[in-house]
Amino acid sequence: MAAKNVYLFSEGKAEMRELLGGKGANLAEMTRIGLPVPPGFTVTTEACREYFSRGGGIWAELEEEVKAALGRLEEQTGKRFGCRDNPLLISVRSGSVFSMPGMMDTILNLGLNDETVQGLAKVSGNERFAYDCYRRFIQMFADVVLKVEHFNFEMALENKKKALGVRYDTELDASALKELVSEYKKIVARETRKQFPEEPVNQLMLSIQAVFDSWNNHRAVVYRQINNLPDHLGTAVNIQAMVFGNLGEDSGTGVAFTRNPSDGTNELYGEFLINAQGEDVVAGIRTPLPIARMADYMPEAYRQLTRLCRLLEEHYRDVQDIEFTVEKNRLYLLQTRAGKRTANAAVKIAVDMADLGLISREEALLRVNPAQLSQLLHRRIDPAARLDIIARGLPASPGAATGRVVFQADDAERLGGEGEKVILVRPETTPDDIHGIVAAQGILTSRGGMTSHAAVVARGMGKPCVSGCEELEIDLAARQFTAAGRRFKEGDLISIDGSGGQVIAGAVPLIDPVLSDEFTRLLTWADEKRRLGVRSNADTPEDARKAREFGAEGIGLCRTEHMFMSQDRLPVVQQMILAKTPEERRQALDKLLPMQQGDFTAIFEAMAGFPVTIRLLDPPLHEFLPKFEDLLVEVTLLKERKGDPQLLKEKEELLRSVRTHQEFNPMLGHRGCRLGLVTPEIYRMQAVAIFRAAAGLIRRGIPVRPEVMIPLVGHENELKPLRALVEEAAAGVMAETGVRIEYLVGTMIELPRACVAAGRIAAHADFFSFGTNDLTQTTFGFSRDDAEGKFLLSYLQQKILPNNPFEVLDREGVGELVTMAADRGRAARPEIKLGVCGEHGGEPSSIGFFHQAGLHYVSCSPYRVPVARLAAAQAALMHR
Amino acid sequence: MAAKNVYLFSEGKAEMRELLGGKGANLAEMTRIGLPVPPGFTVTTEACREYFSRGGGIWAELEEEVKAALGRLEEQTGKRFGCRDNPLLISVRSGSVFSMPGMMDTILNLGLNDETVQGLAKVSGNERFAYDCYRRFIQMFADVVLKVEHFNFEMALENKKKALGVRYDTELDASALKELVSEYKKIVARETRKQFPEEPVNQLMLSIQAVFDSWNNHRAVVYRQINNLPDHLGTAVNIQAMVFGNLGEDSGTGVAFTRNPSDGTNELYGEFLINAQGEDVVAGIRTPLPIARMADYMPEAYRQLTRLCRLLEEHYRDVQDIEFTVEKNRLYLLQTRAGKRTANAAVKIAVDMADLGLISREEALLRVNPAQLSQLLHRRIDPAARLDIIARGLPASPGAATGRVVFQADDAERLGGEGEKVILVRPETTPDDIHGIVAAQGILTSRGGMTSHAAVVARGMGKPCVSGCEELEIDLAARQFTAAGRRFKEGDLISIDGSGGQVIAGAVPLIDPVLSDEFTRLLTWADEKRRLGVRSNADTPEDARKAREFGAEGIGLCRTEHMFMSQDRLPVVQQMILAKTPEERRQALDKLLPMQQGDFTAIFEAMAGFPVTIRLLDPPLHEFLPKFEDLLVEVTLLKERKGDPQLLKEKEELLRSVRTHQEFNPMLGHRGCRLGLVTPEIYRMQAVAIFRAAAGLIRRGIPVRPEVMIPLVGHENELKPLRALVEEAAAGVMAETGVRIEYLVGTMIELPRACVAAGRIAAHADFFSFGTNDLTQTTFGFSRDDAEGKFLLSYLQQKILPNNPFEVLDREGVGELVTMAADRGRAARPEIKLGVCGEHGGEPSSIGFFHQAGLHYVSCSPYRVPVARLAAAQAALMHR
């Protein structure tokens, strides 16, 4: 038996979304609960798929079903389709399962032709209105069904106005519109070599076909691609009786939100226009009135709307965004859907609704998108501002900033010191630039990915950064850059949006973050529900304090390398690296020890009582050396200019050293525990600094819980001697100070081999912290810096990968290794503590995975802590 | 009950090696089978371990057992220990389970003192002999037991000779030796502040203790470290009655091999000295005689020796290396062990013995160390030559070569063209240098690892290469390098040994490889036993032919990138990479297509009938571009010199392009299938070239079995579209030529993610080829080029890793992933073909693993094919 292809609104309900599409199911639901919806019916998505499998064309059964449904509309409205006395007019709209821009536009007033237009004129008592409807219908139908370029009609309209010497469409009278109708039809005949279809049923069948076909138009296909939506679903078609808001002063049209979508206030919000159709609102010729004024113009309809809004919110248990029309004082609801809202509003609405008992606290927690939360924690660009965007890069560190362009870290520091706001613009940054990054409002680089030096340092400092902005051509010598064909010199004002990746010419208005009472309450509820702990990645006391403010329960990753990068320490670090004798190295380390101890003291103090996981030095040492490229140019020029031979000799020697330290693949090079094993003095110094700092604080009565973490372990034999080294340092400090320190020693799990060998590694580790950034890099064989600039975008466009695996954890690949490691680690050492400190630790869907994998905590950047708290609660609610 | 600490030789046997040590078990076995071995006994390794667990010192039970055994020696020899009339003298030697240099030296003549020496003089009728024995004993004992530096004794000896006006020790008469004995004892008293121990039992106990202690002396510890031997085993002590080869013209001593250890000839081989002790042979004052001459001097002993040699070979079923002494016409065997032999000899001996029925063919196969085989396939340095080694690097490609130093590829090409033999010396090589590598005898680089460009290209060409020779300081501008403080200029002669990594000043004598009949027969036996197929990695027709010669059954990896690197193609390849429009790229590809087709035609033809696995382009494209560093210097100088502005502009543009293509971690960058997915034109061109080449040959009646391999797949979605692309190209060529081509499409498994996802990937793959080089890099997170230069050596020294995982497959980590992938691949597609094409495919122990993992074939460089055939047979014999 053939499937039913057509459902009256009164036959459907909300749950039939897959069959009726989102809009169709919604109209059916509204009808079902007794709202005043103009009657109509839906051609199903199944019919659309059947249409494609038949290779196109409306088949007889479908046409029969549509006609039967039309018959029901005629009964309900008392009008007749194609009737010259009291014609039924209808709208045709697409409606797929997922809301999807790019599909066919709406066609209004279908059913008009040279005969029925007269009936409309008669019934409405307004000939001008009837011909205006007719002209609009022809234009819409020709555009979206017959593919006649709409400038043809616009030109005809312009010519008509010019000929009559009028300025606005509304000044055209009925006879002008009649002439226009006939000119429009000529255009159609000329462009399509066919007459405009006068027969209403024929108009309808062509429209249904056009809706089906629009499923595969270019914009729709691209949209599905970008949003990872499946291609096979197809679209439904919604056919509904027209109602008119433009039948006089007792008619009108508008849009209403049941609550304020911008700040969440519980009030009717929206606007309306008297004597107008929906498209007039969009056209922007007349300014709509605030919804509250409706009470003055049509008090009865307003009262009914207010009542229905309450009803809708109670029914759908969420804020609704409603389109309505009043036809001769009678209110019709055309659409209702969950209202889009700002992060701010989402939080307030969820908490308010829970307080009202409309939803439970659990539901409130599930109502807020965790990813949206971080919007609330950074300065952002006023959404109302108009932006002069000149380039787009990677959104490397969220937040927005405005400042004057500088190209050198020294200039940034100098001007910043004078109170000037600056944006540091560089091809890429190195540890040498750190003082400039500190002084700048934001960082913009033309190279490097989401884990480039600039990106990582900026995120750590909570400063906006746009990285890998390859459209920028920077000329350091001329102190200028070009973008979008325009030149920007040092001192010019620009802005960057590190949340979106935009670079903007000039200053922009910024909005400061304010954390509402509701925000705090929602997160308290989240804390009650979640099972995962939430720690923060923090390298400085400021970060640590910020993390505590946002509710972090400890530090999951304190990177010690950033401590080596400050202007005053770098020379000592370089001395340590380039030391020609053990003695020279020892001297440098002796200088670094008290500095490191000071760092740890400050961080432990800020995190008093909470665990602090300190990762021993991780990056390859050449990251601390001057840039090879700069040195090469310097030496080449010194030689050419026959400069100071002593200087040349020194520089040449430095160049040689730097070259020796260079690596082909630094990501896979001499870093992590490999440093600690080849040059144990460095780790020993760090361990002593950690325990001396701890001992000092404990003596002052401040509780300290250090967790020493060895990076990049792949084999148990790497961890074993380094654990011994740390234990020896601890024992030494305890003996020397007489203070007892409780501490843990563990390792990062960030290599595939570590996952395989996790059982054996666990024998020497009190904890595992999954470094999912590096694990993703090695599991995929993707260098993040290179992938994001070179091929990952293409992979996502081609849907080779569903997501950027550096943002959303790859469950199938990396995830299986994480699970393997967690299982083997637990089997070997049941009490082992398991956490995550890669960036996935702040990404909601990945947090869901970590919850399911049974980890104990996630750690993320301070600004992501609230996100993680909420996401962890949602994970606990969804996977109990 | 206490363990038995002492075993008479007559109580032990060969199987008791763990308890008695290698030497002790051997002496026992020799005794057991009735050979004339001087009687003796062994203190067990267990006693040694007990000694260490007691913290040192000879305990009472042990002393008692030793004394009891001494009593048995007295019975057997009719002499008495410490007796002034007919004293028993003994030797004391260490003997651990594994042969181990660095342990305590031998002590001979133990039991002598001021009284017993007179008995010895009387019994031997030779006072001079007796005192010479005594003086030697004191010196040995003082040196190895009492730790008195032996230069003390040498000085006393020198002084004595000077005082007496004689030149050789042998010119000292009995009274001079008596005086020397008393001087030696004074030295001992002075240096140790104790008298020399006169009591023979005391002498023996101190010696046993010294042997035990020597287990932990520095050289022994280092030796165990280097050779990965366990530290806990301990050593046995062998105590044996002395026999004397220096009792007159009817006595003597010598060494014999039962077959010629250098070429394997079945003849008694060795040398002997009349009237001498073992140490006289070593001292080198008298020239020993060839063993055959013994027949003239002591025919009876010689006949007996010959007979015993046969007996020993039959008993041990292997070539024996025998030490013997003749005391007054009576033959004693002091030691026998499996004789060390050259690769050549090993092959001949194994085959000869199998032919004789002495061993089975299976045993013959197990007798030859596969790793040794490759010695036979390359030119090598005459082992007799004295070498002036100036530096050591990595043994990157085996074989030896001599030639004149050149620093530029162009010079190599020019001089090579003139018939000059040259060695190309470079910091590192790039594709630009390929014509120089072709023209050179060998390659020497100061940077780069075992997989650097130079190493890979050289191995592919079978040319010797030493890479990463960091001791070399190359000054390209001055056309010279320094090493070991010496300067070598362009044109100077040097030699390199790519099997050992040595760089040698001057020319060296080279030996050409000749493959013996036995070699061929052994490998034929191997082919009958092995289950693994053996293919070769080959990029050129020459390689393919060489591989066939060595018995390869197809090509397992044909890298297409080397085809892009020749001087005439590189400009076209660069044009393709730097193309600004698709049209420009197409033009370049159109030029490359016929060249590639020609390459494949020649390779298919050389491999007619055998499968040829062709890997589509793998390396990142920037490898084909000019070097960034050179360009940067060029641009800097052009700017400084205000040179031709047009040229500057071009170079600057090229520099920008090259910079855009540069990568942070090329190993993890835009390479492999990522190229094929982002720029499908390249793969399409290659696929068309493959199938056109195949079609052309098939039409000529030559069978072709192409297997197209997609590199670096980590996700099934990468393989799916590329498989479709290859299939489309095949279908196109088949349609265009009307020729039917059987082919396979498969992928490399060289990323951890590919191992995890192997089941899903197998859905689109006819075969998997494990790329264990890259899989090792990503699983460990080791960049091979960096690791081997920076930290891997230290890892091996510290025993963090048991082996270099790039040489011997890491079974625990990488191996588990290989097994996982093989299992999942087979589960998803039972008929899937599984092979290996990483360098481990030519390494014997890794081949054993691949056999056990159930793979179908290994693929290795042509020169490793014989190694792999033998290793595969051994694997099949050991793991049936």
Image (cartoon, coloured by chain):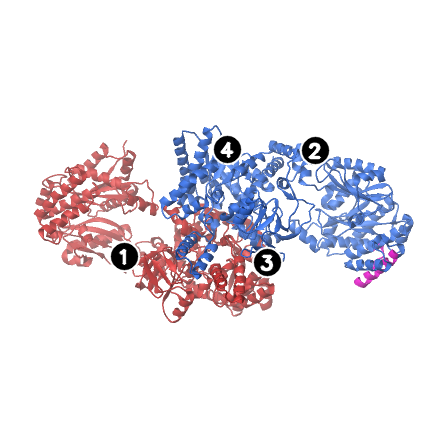
Chain colours: A blue, B red
The amino acid type of the residue labelled 3 equals Ala
* Nearest-to-viewer mark from 2 and 1: 2
Element assignment for label 3: helix
Q: Quadrant of residue A165?
A: bottom right
Q: Are marks 3 and 4 on the same chain?
A: no
The amino acid type of the residue labelled 2 equals Asp
Q: Nearer the viewer, residue A681 or A181?
A: A681
Chain to which the residue tagged by mark 3 belongs: B
The amino acid type of the residue labelled 4 equals Glu
Q: Magenta span covers which residues? A: A176-202
User: Marks 3 and 2, how far apart in space?
Assistant: 55 Å
- The residue beneath circle 1 is B261
* Farthest-out residue, top: A701
Residue B555 vertical position relative to residue B206 in the rendered view, above or below:
below
The local crowd at label 4, few if under 14, some if 14 to 19, many if 20 or more residues have their Cα within 10 Å, is: many
Quadrant of the snapshot with the C terminus of chain A: top right
> In terms of sequence position, does the residue under pointer 2 or pointer 4 come before the other?
2
- The residue beneath circle 2 is A352
Element assignment for label 2: helix
- Residue A814 in the image, given as x and y percentages of width and height: 54, 45
Chain to which the residue tagged by mark 4 belongs: A
Element assignment for label 4: helix
The secondary structure making up most of the magenta span is helix
User: Marks 2 and 1, how far apart in space?
Assistant: 93 Å
* Nearest-to-viewer mark from 4 and 1: 4
